Image (cartoon, rainbow, N blue to C red):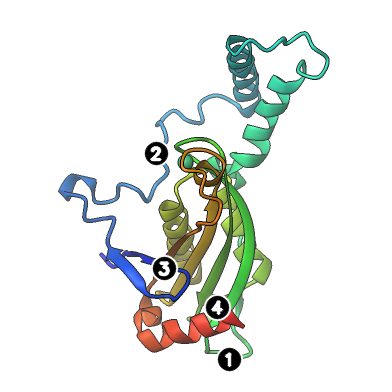
Amino acid sequence: MNLKTEYFAPANGNMISDFSIYEIGDEHMYTGLETPMKPDAFEISDDEKKERISDLFAQIMDVMGLDLTDDSLRGTPDRVAKMYIEEIFSGLNPDNKPKIALFDNKYQYNQMLVEKNITFYSNCEHHFVPIIGKAHIAYVSSGKVIGLSKLNRIVQYYAKRPQVQERLTNQIAMDLKDILNTEDIAVIIDAKHLCVSSRGVKDDASATVTSYYSGVFNKPHKIAELQNYLNQ
Ligand SMILES: [Zn+2]
């Protein structure tokens, strides 16, 4: 299994650890790649989900002692429910996966293509507070190319789920390998977790960097070339 999550010390680019999250144990080979979903996740409609989330969120607000008859708070449960299903967690539903068209590589461009600084907003699945970051994607065409905006759309799709950054990185990489039919993929994500900066240890300066390299991107000179592009 050629799946790795590597961590960098962002200041100098030195790897501080390197492990495969798939070597957790025989029975847990793929733990972490798929978002844990119930088998019946889509047996109720989005409208029904919104109704139920609205009711439940109103209960949370009520338990906290908020007055739901107040003009400013009255609409909040509905707004939160709509935002969860239609926006920030819309990537849970495979129906919302972007449709991807590929084109022939008629320019015969056979070097790495880098799409950098793809801004995304996600949410930490442990605290349900935002993860704000940038994704950088590189690939070498195996004969087909993808519209550049589609790379952004794939990042957004996987970001719009309750996430952990390692899984987000690997989900984007695995999907791109599949879509582009190539092993030559690199995904680097540099993100700030509000569960670390706005609460808990309240460290506003730290950032988390994860990466996935496969194919030619396992070669040190290719990693160096990619980092050169990213530093420009
Ligand atoms: Zn968290």
- Please name the residue that numbered disc 2 is placed on: 36
The residues bearing labels 4 and 2 have C-alpha atoms spaced at a distance of 32 Å
Answer with the quarter of the image where residue 50 lies.
top right
The residues bearing labels 1 and 3 have C-alpha atoms spaced at a distance of 36 Å
Residue at horizontal 58 percent and vertical 57 percent from the top: 133
Instruction: Name the amino acid type tagged 3.
Output: Ala
Answer with the quarter of the image where residue 98 lies.
bottom right
Sequence-first disc among 4 and 2: 2
Instruction: Name the amino acid type tagged 4.
Output: Lys
- Toward the right, the furthest residue is 71
Answer with the quarter of the image where residue 101 lies.
bottom right
Q: Please, what secondary structure does the residue beneath circle 4 have?
A: strand
The residues bearing labels 4 and 3 have C-alpha atoms spaced at a distance of 34 Å
In the visual, does 189 lie left or right of 170?
Answer: right
Looking at the picture, tell me which residue is in the foreground, 89 or 42.
Answer: 89
Sequence-first disc among 3 and 2: 3
Instruction: Name the amino acid type tagged 2.
Output: Pro
Sequence-first disc among 4 and 3: 3
Q: Quadrant of the N terminus?
A: bottom left
In this view, the mark in front (4 or 3): 3
Q: Which mark is residue 85?
A: none
- Please name the residue that numbered disc 3 is placed on: 9
The reply to whether residue 11 is visible in this rendering is yes
Q: Position of residue 184 (x, y in %)?
A: 43, 77
Residue at horizontal 62 percent and vertical 83 percent from the top: 232
Q: Please, what secondary structure does the residue beneath circle 1 have?
A: loop
Q: Which mark is residue 108?
A: 1
In this view, the mark in front (1 or 2): 2
- Please name the residue that numbered disc 4 is placed on: 144
